[in-house]
């Protein structure tokens, strides 16, 4: 037993030596945080930001020095917390200079990466065992499966930072290719946006940054070695993504305008949910299975374990010499049933119908909301594990028919017979399940 413990410790030391250089990089980041406020004259613009950055620089240096020990467990995560705070601090202090926002958010993100993300890669070599969940036909934690969500998070991050730059006063002009700069400015400076104590776009950028970092953290077995990580990742992507989409859908109702960049970010959120939900389902399935076997779900969530019935992943090719198969791996678990494409088209029609026909404002609002919810439900339903979401479209279609009947002319409905037909199509085409290609073990019976 002592030999095993000594062997484990030797492996820990060996792997720690491989990430020794990351601690040196972190010390450099600490020095950077300390001296940049002096070099760029933070004192004349914001004393509190200057004090914060210099204090965080000192803490980063100290935590990095303590992290040189192979047995240090707290300090790398302490560094990650500092990185998160640096992403939030410019928003909390309403940093008056774009340099402050750029410096803190970029350095904060790099500190997270070099404290827990990059150092975690050598440790993955210590994990052995199967990769594919019991009964599944693919591994939802494989890199090709996680890559679409990570790429979408990066795109959303850039979009949100552009809007945050205007909200924080770093730029005076916005460009919108479809709805005009005036509409975009009215949306991101609306009373709804100002109801948040900090820049809502800046908070969105911070969330997208964390989504990317959490998506990149852990290896291909993280669905059972780090369940807590996948759950945190799912909370950021799914519930927060739904809230973001709802806020965007409310733009024409509350503000009376659309914003291209907001719509683009909401579209990315919608696709992130579609591609990320399968890994969350795998983790929930694993935790429930362990709980049935008598193990505490809380213990399983934080410590993981070794699942019974899991198999080796012989299906996912490596990135090198994959002959283009990596791209097909990315869409495992996501199919394109033609009936859901029809319901998405119906939703798009409802969203644009107020621009085509002259209708009462109440009817316009109904079309905006119902259309947006139909499009979102259609795209999320492309994920096989949540194909049941399409039944919400059935409800929306029925409600559309009822609404047309109640608010038919002369009460302000532009083309009632068209919208009656749209409602009927939504009901008709939301009922078929569509093709389910992959297997999900015990979850197969729940895919309706």
Image (tube, rainbow, N blue to C red):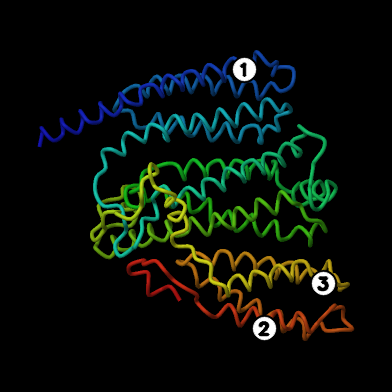
Q: Quadrant of residue 124?
A: top left
Say what secondary structure mark 1 lies in: helix
Task: Reply above or below: 355 against 259.
Answer: below
Q: Could you tell which of marks 1 and 3 lies nearer the N-terminus?
A: 1
Q: Which mark is residue 424?
A: 2
Q: Could you tell which of marks 1 and 2 lies nearer the N-terminus?
A: 1
Q: Where does the C terminus fall, quadrant-wise?
A: bottom left
Task: Name the residue tied to disc 1.
Answer: 36
Front-most of residues 360 and 129:
129
Q: Could you tell which of marks 2 and 3 lies nearer the N-terminus?
A: 3
Say what secondary structure mark 2 lies in: helix
Say what secondary structure mark 3 lies in: helix
Task: Name the residue tied to disc 3.
Answer: 362
Mark 1 nearby-residue class (10 Å; few <14, some 14–19, many ≥20): some
Q: Quadrant of residue 287?
A: bottom left
Looking at the image, how many numbered discs can be counted on the residues?
3
Front-most of residues 233 and 53:
233
Q: Estimate the x, y position of residue 302 in percent, counting from the top left.
A: 35, 48
């Amino acid at each position: 037993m002592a030999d095993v413990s000594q062997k484990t410790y030797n492996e820990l030391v060996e792997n720690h030596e491989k990430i020794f250089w990351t601690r040196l990089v972190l010390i450099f980041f600490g020095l950077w945080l300390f001296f940049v406020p002096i070099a760029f004259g933070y004192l004349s613009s914001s004393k509190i930001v200057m004090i914060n950055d210099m204090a965080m620089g000192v803490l980063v240096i100290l935590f990095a020095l303590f992290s040189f020990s192979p047995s240090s467990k707290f300090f790398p995560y302490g560094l990650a917390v500092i990185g998160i705070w640096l992403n939030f601090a410019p928003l909390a202090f309403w940093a008056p200079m774009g340099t402050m926002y750029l410096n803190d958010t970029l350095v904060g993100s790099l500190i997270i990466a070099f404290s827990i993300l990059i150092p975690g890669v050598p440790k993955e070599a210590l994990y052995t065992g199967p990769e594919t969940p019991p009964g599944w036909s693919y591994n939802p934690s494989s890199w090709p499966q996680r890559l679409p969500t990570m790429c979408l998070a990066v795109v959303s991050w850039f979009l949100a930072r552009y809007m945050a730059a205007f909200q924080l006063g770093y730029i005076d002009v916005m460009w919108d290719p479809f709805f005009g700069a005036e509409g975009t400015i009215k949306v991101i400076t609306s009373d709804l946006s100002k109801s948040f104590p900090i820049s809502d776009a800046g908070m969105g950028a911070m969330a997208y940054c964390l989504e990317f970092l959490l998506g990149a953290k852990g290896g291909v077995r993280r669905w059972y070695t780090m369940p807590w990580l996948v759950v945190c990742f799912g909370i950021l992507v799914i519930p927060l993504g739904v809230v973001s989409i709802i806020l965007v859908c409310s733009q024409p109702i509350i503000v009376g305008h659309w914003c291209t960049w907001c719509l683009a970010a909401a579209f990315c959120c919608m696709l992130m949910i579609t591609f990320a939900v399968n890994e969350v389902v795998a983790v929930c399935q694993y935790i429930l299975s362990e709980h049935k076997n008598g193990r505490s779900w809380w213990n399983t969530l934080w410590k993981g374990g070794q699942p019974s019935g899991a198999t080796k992943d012989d299906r996912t090719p490596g990135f090198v010499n994959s002959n283009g198969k990596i791209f097909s791996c990315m869409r495992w678990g996501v199919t394109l049933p033609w009936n859901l494409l029809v319901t998405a088209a119906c939703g798009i029609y409802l969203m644009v119908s107020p621009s085509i026909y002259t209708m009462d404002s109440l009817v316009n609002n109904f079309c905006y909301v119902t259309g947006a919810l139909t499009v979102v439900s259609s795209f999320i339903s492309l994920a096989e594990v949540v194909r049941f979401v399409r039944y919400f479209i059935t409800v929306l279609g029925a409600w559309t028919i009822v609404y047309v009947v109640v608010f038919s002319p002369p009460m302000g409905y532009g083309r009632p017979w068209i919208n009656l037909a749209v409602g009927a199509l939504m009901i008709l085409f939301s009922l078929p399940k569509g093709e389910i290609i992959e297997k999900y073990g015990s979850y197969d019976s729940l895919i309706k």
